[in-house]
Structures are given as C-alpha cells and as structure tokens.
C-alpha cells in the first residue's frame, strides 16, 4: 500500500465511573470500625482535644502526649506539649557552653556544631601551611590550606600551593620558545627567571600520538590549533568524525545526528537504535475505548499496546465493551437495586434486585394494593382515588387523558374519551407514563435496520457517492426507538476523486483532500459521532478494525480528516459514521442533521499541509 500523510484531530472523552449504592429493604447497614474507637475514621492527630488518629486517646500519638518544636527565645529551641486541646508554653532546658565539634548544640542556638549561623571551623596545619578544617556531623573534616591556588608562573613564588616554588608536578616549570632557524625549543625557570631557549624538536607531519610532531609547541593539533580529526564510518550509513584525544582517536561521531524515531535506525548517532533519552527502548502512550496504555518500539515499529481491549458485554456487573454502560443490552445491571411497586394511597414502595441473569427479581418489602374499603378516607387499591368503584357524588368532576373532564352522574363516572395519539412533543400525550414512546417508524426509525442491531454491519448505506468538490451531502436521522431504549445510528458511504488532466501532464504533482463530517444535534441534547476510515475498497480494513477511528468529544461536533496524496493514486475511500448520545444526554425524538463534504485541491506542485 502506498504511503500517505494523515492529519487528524480528535479528543477522546475520559471514561466516567459511577458507584451504585445498593440497599436491600429491611437490612441493616454496617460501617468499618477502628480497633481504638468504634466508628472512628483515622486522620493525622492534631491539638484539638479530639482522638483524630483513633488510638483511643485524644491529643496523643504512639502513646505519648502530642508535642512540637518551638522557639524559646534567645536563639534557643524548645518544645510545646498539647494540653486539653491547646498548645502549652515553649520550654527549654539547654545550658549554653562553648560550641565544640561533637554533633551537639552546646551554645543553645538551635543548631549543632554551628556558631554565628555558620559551621564550626578551626585553624590547622595543612602540610606546613596554615589551613582550616570544618566540623561536619560531630567530626573535624580534612585540613584545607588557606592558600588560593593559581597557575604556576616563573616569579619565585608558590602560585599553585603545592609547597614548591616555580614548580609543577615536582619539576621546574618549562615554556615552549623560539630557538631560531624555524625550530621550537624550551626554556626552564630558575629562581623566578627564565633560562636560555634550547631547541629540542625536528619538525614532521602532526599525527595522533600525544607528541608535538610539527614542533609548534602543541600536541595533536592542526595548523589552526584545533584538535586533529579524521573521517570515519559510524556504522549506520552516515559519515562520522573522530577527534584525537590524548594521543588516541576518540569515538566515531555522526556529522548529522537527528531526533531518534521508531524506525530501526540510529537517528541520533549515539550507537543505539530506537532508544529514548535514558538509553532504553522507546515507548509511547496508546489507548483503546477502555482507557490508556503503553506500546513499545520493536523492529522499527510500534506494537504491543497494553491498554485493556473491549470485549462483548456479558451479565457480570462490569462494563465489558467499555461504552460507559454496565450490562447494557440486558434488563438491568447485575446487583443493581431499584424501588418497585407504588407509594400511592395506602401502598408503600418495595425493593427489587437485579439477579445473576440481569433480570429484575420479585418486588419485596412493599405494601401492595388491596380491595377498596369504601370508607371515604383511604385509597386501599392505591390507584390515587379514594373509594373508586364505589358510588360517587353527582356533580363531582375529574380529568381524563387529554384534558377532558367528566362529571359523576347517577353515582357513577362515565367513560373517558379515547386518549390522544402520542406525537413527538416531549409530552406523554396518551397518558401511559412514557414520553414520546411508540412513534411511527416513518420518519422516526427509517435509519434503523429491521433487526434493531446497532453496528456497522446493520448500518444504513448512503447510496450517493460523495464526490470531490461535488458539494455538501446532508441527511437527517433520529436517535430514537419506540421503546425509548438507547439508540446508535451507523451510516456507510463512499468518496470519489475527480479525474484531472493536470495529473497526466504532471504525474508527480500532489493532491490534497479534506473530508469534513459535521453533526447538528437537536436542542437540549448532547450527541457525539465517530468516523471509521476503511481506506480504498479491498484494502482489508473493516469497521471493527479500521485504518483510523476519529471521534468527537465535548462540544465539538465536527471531524476534519485530511489526506495527503499524489497523482496516479486512488483516493476514493470507504467510511462509516456512528452517531450516538453522549453519556448523560437527554433523549429526544427530534431529528439530527449529518453533513458530509469531500473537497480537494486538485493537482498541485506544492506539498500538502
């Protein structure tokens, strides 16, 4: 497959974790108790009269009264103790004496082996010279000469503090000089005076041997006084240079090091392949729908991403497919509890638990409806009406679904009119307790496969080919199901490039394309979308394993996918677009609008941005 550069911008929404508190009806809740104080939650002990660390004693830690260091005045350090939740007086028992090097605070200034805010020092003999030693950790350090060493010169003085005059390394200092006749010589310092220049060299070509071959008074340097160098092969296909160091050729260094990348080459010329700045193998972040991970560079390629991979959702109380929903596709999440029954009239709500097959169990612990006693006071059958089924008072009125009122006649209520038909208006028109349910397939579910399976294989095929610079394609859809279950829509489409005669004349020209997919969501909702890039037909990519997957996040409702190509290449790709509600989005039967626009620059000599 040919190489092409893609530019994509996408942000992944972080996974949202929710903890569900489960409370069974009639059961007692427990709490974790500290062995010291039942029910106590341990924190750091503070001076407040409370047992913060749960050891059974207030203002105490490790069996001792809480204390802290303090300034007792006069440069002395003291201690405060906590008494009845308040810090007491700062107390010290230090008796000041002369500071000595013993690791103790003799002069009571709060610092050991210190005086005047500085480490304790003492004069000493540094090999016949006056020196100074410093106290460190209660022990005297090495005696250091007070002499300030400089470069030794011919002046009858000990400049380098080695105890010898006009001498270096135990030898009289010498200096290269002009001995005449183009020869280099040396002169020796004696009692602060330079002696006669004596020739000692026969000029030859300078070589890397730690010698002054050309008699210029300098070792292993060229005519420009720079260290000798030679061309070498660093072994990675590049040209290198070796520098003479102490009479030997140094390491062969690349002349043009680059930033190390994962390509099986030594880009930065340090002798190692595909390593990071610490010298170990390169790694980088990677992710799946389940979260982040790390992949390694091996053989010049990125591989082995260790992020958790989504799996098929099963009934186990876990979000296996990493779509942010636990046990979705089942009636309920395993272990989930919910109220059941009714609390209207004399009834009381019960509790039901989602069982191991992700189905709701029996409603337990509630008060269920009973036969109406017709006592004029209580609603025993829990339908919201007292004494329903009994004779009513003539002239009394009540509301029917749709707003119609009926009047009690002859001690009985007449029948209510047929409820209104449910429409998409965010209202419960037919008074069945559900808002906008059961709407007709046309137009609310035209984008749904008859199987009601939400994936690429059951997606809606856009029969119109999205042609380069052919204008924006627009369609409407609904994230809606009659039973108000969560919905996701998939659309498949194909793009096509325009044949351009300039490519015939300029086969090496570049062609740049941009696929823009935008989503206009209904008011009050938060819809997101993902673009699956499958490359050209026959490339082997699928929706389950696309070449690229780009998703919107946050408030962004547009995806721009850039393709850098060239003349002579097929740039008509297959794509899938997935539209879905973001976590926590309000459900709506209102339509959304999906727009697709495929634009190209046409053949151009300039490279694609």
Image: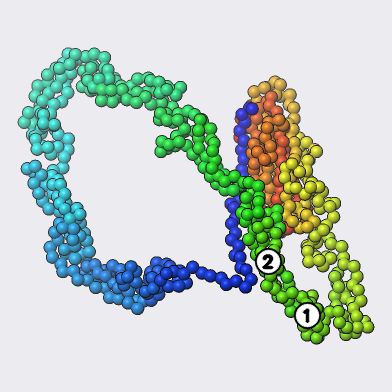
| Total marks in image | 2
Which residue is at 80% across, 78% downward?
A: 371
Label 2, secondary structure: give it: strand
**Above or below, comparing residue 171 to residue 576 in the picture:** above
Q: Residue at x 38, y 20 (%)?
A: 232
Residue 412 falls left or right of residue 87: right
The way the protein has been coloured in the rendering is rainbow
Residue at 28% over, 22% down: 248
Residue 221 lies, in percent from the top left, at 27, 22
Q: Mark number for residue 256?
A: none
Relative vertical location of residue 502 with respect to residue 482 in this rendering, above or below: above
Residue annotated with mark 1: 379
Indicate the position of residue 251 as horizontal and vertical percent values: 34, 26
Quadrant hosting residue 217: top left
Looking at the image, residue 541 sits to the left or right of residue 286; the answer is right
**Image check: 274 left or right of 206?**
right
Counting from the top left corner in percent of width and height, residue 477 is at 78, 49
Please tell me which residue lies in front, 174 or 107: 107
Q: Is residue 25 positioned above or below 551 on the image?
A: below
Q: Which residue is mark 2?
A: 352
Picture residue at 19% right of the left edge, 53% below the top: 136
């Amino acid at each position: 497959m040919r190489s092409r550069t893609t530019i994509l911008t996408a942000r992944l929404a972080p996974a949202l974790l929710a903890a569900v508190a489960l409370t069974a009806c009639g059961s007692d809740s427990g709490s974790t108790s500290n062995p010291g104080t039942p029910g106590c939650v341990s924190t750091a002990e503070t001076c407040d009269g409370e047992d913060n660390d749960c050891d059974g004693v207030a203002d105490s830690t490790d069996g001792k009264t809480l204390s802290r260091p303090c300034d007792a005045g006069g440069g002395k350090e003291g201690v405060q103790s906590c008494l009845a939740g308040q810090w007491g007086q700062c107390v010290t028992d230090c008796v000041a004496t002369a500071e000595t090097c013993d690791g103790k605070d003799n002069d009571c200034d709060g610092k050991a082996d210190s005086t005047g805010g500085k480490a304790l020092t003492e004069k000493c003999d540094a090999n016949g010279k006056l020196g100074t030693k410093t106290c460190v950790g209660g022990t005297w350090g090495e005696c250091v000469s007070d002499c300030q060493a400089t470069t030794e010169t011919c002046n009858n003085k000990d400049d380098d503090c080695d105890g010898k005059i006009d001498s270096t390394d135990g030898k009289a200092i010498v200096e290269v000089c002009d001995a005449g006749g183009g020869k280099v010589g040396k002169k020796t310092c004696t009692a602060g005076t330079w002696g006669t220049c004596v020739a000692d060299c026969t000029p030859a070509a300078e070589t890397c041997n730690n010698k002054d071959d050309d008699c210029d008074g300098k070792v292993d340097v060229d005519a420009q006084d720079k260290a000798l160098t030679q061309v070498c092969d660093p072994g990675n296909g590049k040209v290198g240079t070796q520098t003479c160091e102490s009479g030997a050729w140094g390491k062969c260094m690349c002349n043009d090091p680059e930033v190390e990348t994962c390509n099986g080459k030594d880009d930065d010329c340090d002798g190692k392949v595909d390593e990071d700045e610490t010298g170990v193998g390169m790694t980088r972040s990677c992710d799946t729908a389940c979260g982040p991970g790390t992949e390694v560079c091996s053989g010049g390629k990125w591989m082995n991403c260790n992020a958790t991979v989504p799996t098929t959702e099963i009934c186990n109380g876990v979000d296996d497919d990493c779509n942010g929903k636990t046990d979705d596709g089942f009636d309920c999440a395993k272990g989930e509890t919910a109220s059941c029954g009714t609390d209207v009239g004399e009834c009381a709500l019960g509790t039901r638990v989602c069982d191991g097959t992700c189905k709701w169990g029996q409603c337990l612990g509630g008060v269920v409806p009973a036969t109406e006693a017709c006592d004029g006071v209580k609603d025993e059958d829990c339908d919201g009406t007292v004494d329903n089924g009994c004779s009513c008072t003539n002239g009394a009125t009540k509301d029917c679904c749709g707003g119609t009122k009926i009047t009690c006649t002859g001690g009985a209520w007449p029948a209510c009119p047929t409820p209104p038909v449910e429409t998409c208006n965010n209202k419960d028109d037919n008074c069945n307790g559900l808002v906008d349910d059961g709407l007709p397939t046309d137009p609310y579910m035209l984008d749904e496969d008859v199987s009601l399976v939400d994936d690429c294989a059951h997606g809606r095929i856009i029969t119109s080919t999205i042609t380069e610079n052919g204008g924006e394609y627009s369609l409407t859809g609904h994230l809606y199901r009659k039973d108000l279950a969560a919905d996701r829509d998939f659309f498949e489409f194909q793009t096509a490039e325009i044949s351009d005669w300039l490519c015939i004349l300029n086969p090496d020209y570049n062609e740049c394309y941009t696929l823009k997919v935008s989503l206009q969501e209904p008011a009050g909702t938060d819809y997101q979308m993902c673009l699956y890039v499958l490359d050209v037909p026959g490339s082997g990519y699928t929706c389950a394993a696309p070449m690229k997957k780009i998703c919107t996040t946050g408030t962004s409702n547009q995806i721009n996918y850039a393709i850098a190509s060239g003349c002579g290449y097929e740039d008509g790709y297959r794509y899938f677009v997935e539209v879905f509600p973001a976590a926590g989005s309000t459900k709506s039967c209102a339509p959304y609008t999906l727009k697709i626009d495929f634009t190209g620059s046409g053949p151009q000599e300039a490279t694609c941005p």
